[in-house]
Amino acid sequence: MSARDDRAAALWADARRDAGWNAEKAAELTSWLKDRPDRAELLRRHEALLDDAALVWATQRVAARSQTPRGFGAFRRGRLFQPVMAAGLAAVAGVVVLAGVGLAPRGDRLVGKRGETQPIALADGSAVRLNGLSEVQVELGESERRLRLKGEGFFEVAPDKTRPFSVEVDGVRVTAVGTRFNVDQRPKADGAAIEVVVFEGAVDVRSNRGISMRVRAGERAVVSRGVIQRAVLAHPEVETDVPSWAKGWLEFNDATLVSVVEDLERASGVRVELADPAVARVLVSGRLASDQPENALAAMVGVHGLTLTRKGTDQFVISKS
């Protein structure tokens, strides 16, 4: 099974349930399936997944919760495991600062909790959201604003030309130019890779080797071994949006199962063991609801023909069937 066919099957399964489905699209699907029983089986799996009552219920629960007055837009369409290209989320309107959230004092250490992604207001008017197992040390000085990050955070920066706002992680410095951006620290065997995604404005990224690059809205930069690689996002977030993890979703496009599991563990607190290296290398494309980790795992293994076994409370093993 190729990752490309798997992604295409997911898209076809979703498209067949759309009101815009017509004879022309049906003919395209017939052509795609011709003499390919493997593709037909992939399509069957994805359609069975979309029809799974338990998964539909879980998604409806997430969608209903998202419509509570928390500053988030409602889901226009929602499925627990849905192709990224077919995803539809209403835009988030403006910066969210909840009533009752205190201002973080200068020099404070903020710690992210699993499943809690509400913004924390800083004393300068900026806001920070932290993913699970993440933390940031805030230092708001007279001449600069410096935050030291471990893990992943989304930053909405209040303008102040006299005090630059920068986020530092593993020797990499990301300096805001009036902006909203996400920084993610991803540990690797040969050292951490730092991913920066800009939602609005621009940032200046400086690596631990002194290499600098400006990254603008709709662009992504990855810093690894001191080298910065920049790319335009295939589907850039709108300026009023927030990262998918801050909405309770994890989105992937040809990501290895091991990296998907790492993100799910960070967001939800589950522990997942991959039985062998071949399972770890399985490529995943789609969207998972992080507040229903067991259903999310069941969705993945169902699509890829793997087996999910519960090992204990919030502990699972994924193996070949």
Image (cartoon, helix red, strand yellow):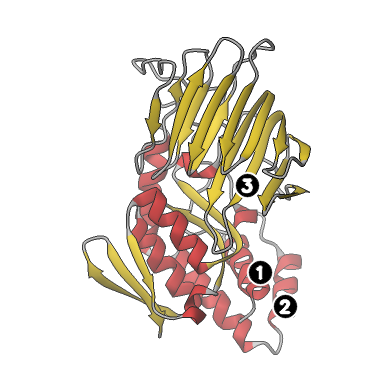
Question: Label 1 sits on what residue type?
Answer: Ala
Q: Residues within 10 Å of mark 3 (few under 14, many from 20)?
A: some
Left or right, residue 138 beside residue 231: left
Question: Label 3 sits on what residue type?
Answer: Glu
Say which element carries label 3: strand
Query: Residues at badges 2 and 1 in contact (C-beta under 8 Å)?
Result: yes
Name the foreground residue: 228 vs 272: 228
Give the position of the N terminus as an image quadrant: bottom right
Tell me the residue that label 3 is attached to: 195
C-alpha distance separating marks 1 and 3:
27 Å
Q: Give above or below for 58 relative to 189.
A: above
Q: Name the front one of labels 2 and 3.
A: 3
State the image coordinates of residue 119 (x, y, percent, origin top left). 45, 27
Q: Which mark is residue 8?
A: 1
Q: Give above or below for 206 relative to 224.
A: above
Question: Label 2 sits on what residue type?
Answer: Trp
Tell me the residue that label 2 is attached to: 32
Q: Give above or below for 7 relative to 204.
A: below
Does the rendering let one see residue 19?
A: no
State the image coordinates of residue 113 (x, y, percent, origin top left). 34, 39
Say which element carries label 1: helix
